[in-house]
Image: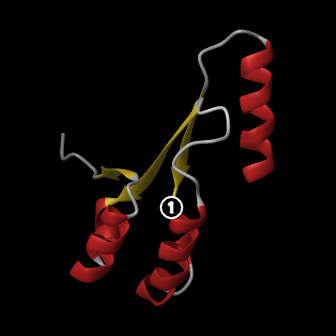
Amino acid sequence: MKKLVASLSQRARKEGRIGVTAIVDMGFFFLFGGDGRATELINYEASLAPKTEGGNVRGFSCYHGGNYDTLKDNQKKELAQKGKKLLEVTESAS
């Protein structure tokens, strides 16, 4: 995935575009093992650079509200300290 984003970043520069936005569904980390994968999730989030070399990639991590709520407060705090933009998605009762 990182190579794809880097490739898109270079392409955007070559084509004179502003940049690339990556919206990542973090549900994978909760699919198998729930909270047991939280450490892996936090390590993955920490491995993602806040900006690419060219600075033209903006990333957002999306969490379903139910999944995000399974994290402990200190885990949520650690994610927030990584300087990541987090989107919490919940179902609306319409």
Quadrant in the rendering for residue 5? top right
13 or 39: nearer the viewer: 13
Residue 82 spot, x, y in % from top left = 40, 63
Residue 84 spot, x, y in % from top left = 40, 54
Whether 58 is drawn above or below 44: the answer is above
Residue 2 spot, x, y in % from top left = 73, 52
93 left or right of 33? left
Amino acid found under the numbered disc labelled 1: Met
Whether 21 is drawn above or below 14: the answer is below
Quadrant in the rendering for residue 64? bottom left
44 left or right of 72? right
Locate the C terminus and report the quarter of the image it occupies. top left
What count of labels does the image hold? 1
Residue hosting label 1: 26
| Residue ID at (22%, 79%) | 73
Whether 2 is drawn above or below 75: the answer is above
Whether 89 is drawn above or below 40: the answer is above
Badge 1: few (under 14), some or many (20 or more) residues near its Cα, within 10 Å? Answer: some
| Residue ID at (52%, 87%) | 33
